[in-house]
Amino acid sequence: MKKIIVTGGLGFIGSNLIDLLLEKNFFVINVDKVTYSSNFYNVKEFKNKKNYKFVKCDIKDKKFKKLLFNHKPSCIFNLAAESHVDRSIDNPKNFIQSNIVGVYNLLESFKEFSKYFRSKLIHISTDEVYGDILKGRSSEKHPYIPSSPYAASKAASDHLVRSYVRTYKVPAIVTNCSNNYGPKQHPEKLIPKLIYNILNNKPLPIYGKGINSREWIYVKDHCEALFKVFQKGVVGQFYNIGSNKNLNNLEVCKKLLKISKKSQKLGKNVKILFVKDRPGHDIRYALDSNKIKKKLNWHPKTNFEKGIKLTFDWYTNHKTYYNSLSKKDIIRRLGKK
C-alpha cells in the first residue's frame, strides 16, 4: 500500500483530501502542528482506520525529516499554512513563519529525502498571489502581484518551490486554487461564518458594499484536481484550479439566505450587515484553468447551486462542529477590533 503524507490534514482542505485518498486505498500520514484552525472533528470519521495515522509535527521541526525517511511517502501534499487574510493583517509574523520559513524547511527535508527515494511534492497555493484581476482571467503565466501579507507569504513559498525545482532538481509541483467552500471549513471564512449566523439568527457581516468577487470551487472538486496532479502532473509545472464561476460576497449571502428560508425555514429575520472594508481588499480574483483541463483532463463536477446546498445541509446536520471550536474564533471573523 503506497503511503502519502498530507501536511495540515486537520484543516479544511487537508481533511477532505485525506478522505479521498483513504477511499482510493492509500496509507495516509496526517502531519499537523495543531493550531486554532486544526480540528480533530474533521478526521473523526476515519481516525480509527488502519490505513490512517496522525502525527503531531510542525514542518519547521527536525522531526519532519525523520518522518519522511521513516514512512517513505510516494507523495507529500503540503497544505500546512496560515490562510486567513484578516489574521495576516493583524499579525504578519505568523504567516512569514508558517508559509515561508515552514516551506523552506520542508523543501530542505524533501531535497535530502528525494535523493534516495522516488517521491513528489505537491505544494498547494492560492489564486490570491495574482492580485486583483479586474478583467479576464489569470493563467499560470500571469505575474504575481500579491496584495495582503497572506498572499505575499504564499507567493514567496511558491517562488521557493520553483527555485528548488530548478536549482536542486527537487520533484515538486505547485497548484493555485480559487476560493474553496464545503464541509469542515473554519467559520472565520465567509461561507461557514454566514451559515453559523443564519443558524443562530445573527446579522450577516459583509465587507464594504459586498462587491468583492471570488471564484468559488467546491472543496471535493479541488481534492479531485489535486489527485489528478499527483497522478499525471509534470514536475516543475504550475496548475491553476478553478470553477470558472464568480460571485460577489453579496450574491453568496443572498443565495444562502434563499436556501435557508426554503429548506430549513431559517433566516427570515436575519439582516445583512455591511461593515468597514478590509485594508487593501482585492476586488476580484479569477483563474484561467484551461491548462489542467486540457493537460490532465480534470473538470469540476459540482456547480455552485448544488455545492452551496450540500454545504448548508452539512453544517445544519453537524451543528456540533461549531461546538468543537473556540467561540471567540467563530464570532470574530473580521480580525481584531
Image: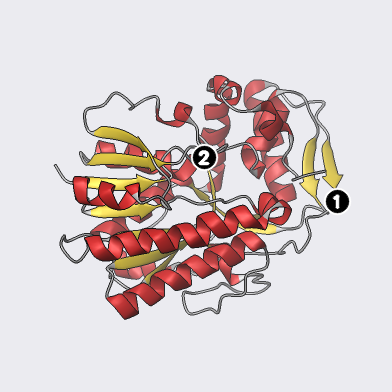
Based on the displayed image, in which of its 4 quarters is residue 215 positioned?
bottom right
Q: Is residue 25 left or right of residue 111?
A: left
Q: Residue at x 27, y 46 (%)?
A: 67
Q: Residue at x 56, y 43 (%)?
A: 305
Q: Is residue 75 left or right of residue 263?
A: left
In the foreground, 99 or 158: 99
Residue 43 seen anywhere in this rendered image of the structure: yes
Residue 100 tag number: none
Label 2 sits on a secondary structure element that is loop
Amino acid carrying label 2: it is Gly
First in sequence: mark 2 or mark 1? 2
Q: Position of residue 293 (x, y in %)?
A: 37, 65
Q: Is residue 66 left or right of residue 178?
A: left
Q: Residue at x 68, y 59 (%)?
A: 213
- Neighbor class of circle 2 (other Cα within 10 Å; few <14, some 14-19, many 20+) is many
The residue identified by callout 2 is 182
Q: CA distance from mark 2 to mark 1?
A: 26 Å
* Residue at the extreme front: 62
- Neighbor class of circle 1 (other Cα within 10 Å; few <14, some 14-19, many 20+) is few
In the foreground, 159 or 43: 159
Q: Where does the C terminus fall, quadrant-wise?
A: top right
Q: Where does the N terminus fall, quadrant-wise?
A: top left
Q: Residue at x 26, y 49 (%)?
A: 66
In the foreground, 223 or 251: 223
